[in-house]
């Protein structure tokens, strides 16, 4: 919810207004801070403008309210009330009442740190107000363009094979800062951009913890820890509203204006933390957990966004500067990351947990497989492009793309169990080997099929290769006899797995030395030596197609 006292338009830098040659404004007193912003222009000839200001105004006055013979005391009181109300600057129009800006007013503005501008006779207050709104419209248009471009960039990053890191990288680039994804256990899963200073980094980590659901049995708000937590949550909720308004300056202006109306700004937000409060020493229901929070530490602007509802993932952002549109861009990234990381705790997830517990307690796999939902499954083996092994984030993204949460990042290969009714298609950035659709009791055989299919796919540089499932001549031989023949034929090399694996891969690739070397990740000379050793031990001519066929028949039985 945005602050009703802050306009839904971006602020205008006072320097931009001074740069308008058609106005001819001149800075004559007060801090010449390039960061000074105004949110609207307001003309008033009241001696005490305090009750009529909300904060962030460029107050315009021709000095009609100044009595004759007014001394420094009058101007000191006048300027102090403007500052107390949150006024951003004072514009004093010369002529027709005053031919020059009173010296005492200049001194008062210097003393209270209020920028003072001289408005020349040719410039009307209406022209100044119109220029302010024109600059606001230009800033709003620039903000919308920036947000739109950022949305398109983040959406393109989310469509990549391993989208989490690209999304964080694009977000960090768009905000000119640092972005990180925190896991439910508060560990930092991935990050991009220049990291913040250590103190700001620790403060941001603490900020992410405030977004995680609290224990409903926590002590009442009267106890010191709970009261501190309530105040922190209230501050986070207020920061979120300020961010939605467009910038950190909006929060400052809103707070100053609240103080001007006689209500301490923090006191109003603390009421949020008192919802459901109980008597001291008793338990109460925990207040709602905020969905975002922000803070500023050592000049670094910090923001955290909860992903989803109750999952515990948090997006954290640290930037050296806060500009209009940052909150919107970060919110878009948070929505995309919610889709990429969200695994809803549904009945399906509960069934998977139940299956895991039963397996750990010794229940045979076929007896718990029905809890996973599907009757037949594909085993998929996957290897990412490049030399680096897949990390848990990449493996999780692969599982999401394949439509399965049953993912095992085992070393350099990721194994995924995919229901047979989910089509397995090629994925950019991955090489896939897919088994035939099998029942749970045949998962070990499917694992072997997928491993061999992946090796062949990598050797042939094919994105996806499926294990053949059509009937073969081997099916005409009784399994017992076929197994006995295979054991007898391969006995000389059975004790050396490297030889059997090399012979199987070499035969599957039609005797290609180079492709076999690629599939096995060994040198081609190693392949030649192993095949020569197999030929010697088997006492067979491996150039004979009949011998190759018989060996292939036997290898498929092992």
Image (cartoon, grey):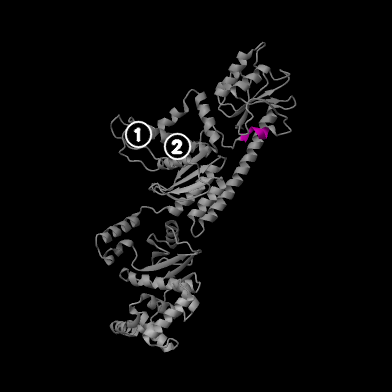
Q: Position of residue 45 (x, y in %)?
A: 64, 20
- Residue 236's label in the rendered image is 2
Determine the secondary structure under disc 1: helix
Residue 68 falls inside the magenta stretch: no
Which segment is the magenta one?
12-17
Between 320 and 147, the one lying in front of the other is 320
Q: Residues within 10 Å of mark 1 (few under 14, many from 20)?
A: some
314 relative position to 21: left or right: left
533 relative position to 136: left or right: left
Residue under label 1, please give it: 226
Between 508 and 379, the one lying in front of the other is 508
Instruction: Name the magenta segment's main secondary structure.
Output: helix
Q: Position of residue 510 (x, y in %)?
A: 47, 81
Where does the C terminus fall, quadrant-wise?
A: bottom left
Q: In the rendered image of this protein, does residue 243 appear above or below residue 544?
A: above
Number of numbered discs visible in the structure rendering:
2
């Amino acid at each position: 919810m945005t602050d009703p006292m802050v306009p839904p338009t971006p602020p205008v830098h006072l320097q931009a207004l001074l740069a308008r040659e058609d106005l001819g404004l001149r800075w004559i007193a007060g801090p010449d801070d390039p960061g000074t912003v105004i949110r609207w222009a307001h003309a008033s000839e009241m001696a005490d403008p305090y009750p009529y200001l909300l904060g962030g105004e460029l107050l315009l006055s021709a000095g009609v309210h100044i009595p004759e013979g007014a001394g420094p005391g009058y101007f000191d009181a006048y300027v102090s009330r403007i500052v107390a109300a949150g006024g951003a600057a004072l514009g004093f129009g010369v002529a027709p009442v005053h031919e020059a800006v009173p010296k005492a007013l200049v001194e008062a503005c210097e003393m209270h740190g209020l920028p003072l501008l001289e408005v020349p006779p040719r410039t009307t207050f209406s022209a100044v107000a119109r220029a302010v709104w024109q600059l606001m419209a230009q800033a709003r248009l620039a903000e919308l363009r920036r947000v739109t471009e950022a949305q398109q960039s983040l959406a393109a990053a989310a469509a990549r094979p391993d989208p989490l890191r690209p999304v964080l990288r694009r977000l960090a680039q768009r905000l000119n800062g640092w972005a990180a994804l925190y896991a439910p256990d508060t560990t930092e899963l991935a990050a991009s951009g220049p990291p913040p200073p250590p103190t700001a980094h620790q403060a941001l980590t603490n900020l992410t913890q405030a977004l995680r659901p609290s224990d409903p049995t926590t002590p009442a708000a009267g106890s010191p820890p709970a009261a501190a937590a309530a105040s922190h949550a209230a501050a986070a909720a207020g920061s979120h509203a300020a961010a939605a308004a467009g910038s950190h300056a909006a929060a400052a202006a809103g707070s100053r204006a609240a103080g001007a109306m006689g209500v301490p700004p923090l006191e109003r937000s603390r009421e949020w933390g008192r919802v459901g409060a109980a008597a001291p020493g008793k338990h109460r229901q925990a207040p709602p957990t905020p969905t975002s929070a922000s803070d500023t530490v050592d000049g670094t602007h910090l923001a955290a966004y909860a992903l989803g509802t109750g999952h515990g993932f948090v997006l954290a952002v640290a930037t050296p500067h806060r500009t209009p549109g940052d909150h919107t861009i970060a919110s878009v990234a948070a929505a995309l990351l919610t889709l990429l990381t969200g695994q809803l705790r549904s009945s399906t997830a509960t069934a998977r947990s139940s299956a895991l517990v039963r397996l750990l307690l010794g229940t045979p796999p076929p007896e718990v497989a029905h809890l996973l939902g599907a009757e037949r499954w594909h085993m998929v083996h996957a290897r990412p492009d490049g030399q680096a092994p897949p990390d848990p984030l990449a493996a999780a993204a692969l599982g999401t793309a394949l439509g399965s949460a049953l993912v095992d990042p085992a070393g350099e290969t990721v194994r995924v169990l995919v229901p047979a009714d989910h089509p397995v298609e090629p994925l950019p950035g991955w090489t896939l080997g897919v088994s035939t659709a099998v029942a749970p009791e045949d998962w070990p055989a499917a694992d072997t099929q997928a491993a061999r299919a992946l090796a062949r796919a990598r050797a042939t540089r094919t994105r996806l290769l499926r294990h053949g499932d059509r009937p073969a001549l081997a099916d005409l031989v009784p399994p017992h006899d076929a197994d006995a023949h295979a054991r007898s034929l391969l006995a000389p090399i059975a004790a050396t797995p490297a030889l059997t694996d090399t012979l199987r891969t070499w035969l599957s690739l039609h005797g290609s030395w180079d492709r076999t070397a690629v599939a096995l990740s060994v040198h081609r000379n190693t392949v030649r030596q192993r095949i020569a050793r197999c030929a010697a031990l088997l006492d067979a001519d491996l150039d004979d197609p009949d011998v190759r066929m018989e060996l292939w028949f036997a290898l498929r039985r092992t």
